Amino acid sequence: MKNTSAKALKPRKTPRQARSVATVDAIFEATIQVLLAEGARGLTTSRVAERAGVSVGTMYQYFPHKMSLLYAVLQQHLEAVAGTVEAACRQNRGQPLAAMAEQLVKAYVDAKTANAEVSRALFQVAVEMDTAELTSGISKRISTAATELLASAADVRFDDLPAVTQTLLAALTGNVRTVFERGAKPAQLKVMRQQLTTMCQAYLLAAAVPTLTVRPIDQTANYGQPWPEGMR
């Protein structure tokens, strides 16, 4: 496959009516099935159309070529991952830092490993395309969600939160991608999640500044006697 520019990868149109949405969903599902069975090089629009139960002409109404189709499937996958992370971040705001880190790692890794074969196949497909605009947008969404999550921590604060978030996510996403590229088995993926949780918790706790709780002054704490009137 040739590296195709972002402009050429965009779909011809976006489905709006329920019937059109269902057709595109069927095409996406068929694309994944053919991709897993035949690989990216063996995937053709005619094979996808046959598997989806639509005509090639119907496919061309939305996707001008197979690379455009693969780009759309990759986009759907990445947006689902981002949506899962965003939801987890919203649900865990205000928690202690260690719990936040655990839930963030869980959300990201689980979204990626829900169907590990699909994620691995799409990693390989992405290398062949200009995905800079797509991945930049997805990364921004995840970074914003993670930043807002960490800013709400109940027990710590960060002096340079943007830098902390950037380092955290680079470590998390980089490790997950490396494991996928090496073809990790389900048992290895489970261990990876545990180890990533430990790593992220340790980094965040090291980078954080504890939040001090200031208690109100007890005016009767002077050996049981009230404070003098002028000192209250």
Image: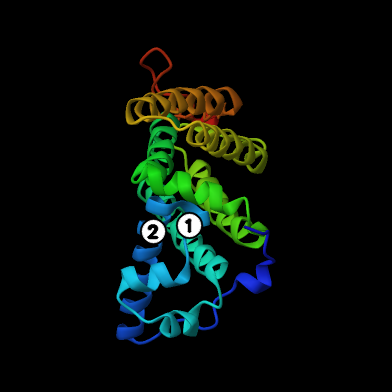
Residue 158 screen position, x and y as percent: 60, 35
Cβ atoms at labels 2 and 1 below 8 Å apart: yes
Q: Secondary structure at mark 2?
A: helix
Q: Residue at x 63, y 54 (%)?
A: 128
The image quadrant that residue 190 belongs to is top left
The image quadrant that residue 137 belongs to is bottom right
Task: Please say whether residue 57 is visible from this viewpoint.
Answer: yes
**153 or 198: nearer the eye?**
198
Residue, disc 2: 34
Residue 24, compared with residue 219, is above or below; it is below
Q: Is residue 207 left or right of residue 117?
A: right
Choose mark 2 or mark 1, whichever is in front: 1
**35 or 151: nearer the eye?**
35
Q: Is residue 219 left or right of residue 29?
A: right
Q: Earlier in the sequence, mark 2 or mark 1?
A: 2
Residue 4 screen position, x and y as percent: 67, 64
- Residue 61 is labelled as none
Q: Which quadrant would the N terminus be assigned to in this image?
A: bottom right
Task: Please say whether residue 15 is visible from this viewpoint.
Answer: no
Residue 115, compared with residue 102, is above or below; it is below
Q: Secondary structure at mark 1?
A: helix
Residue 81 screen position, x and y as percent: 44, 52
Residue 51 screen position, x and y as percent: 32, 68
- Which amino acid lies under the numbered mark 2 shown in the image of this protein? Val
Residue, disc 1: 42
Crowd class of label 1 (few under 14; some 14 to 19; many from 20; radius 10 Å)? few
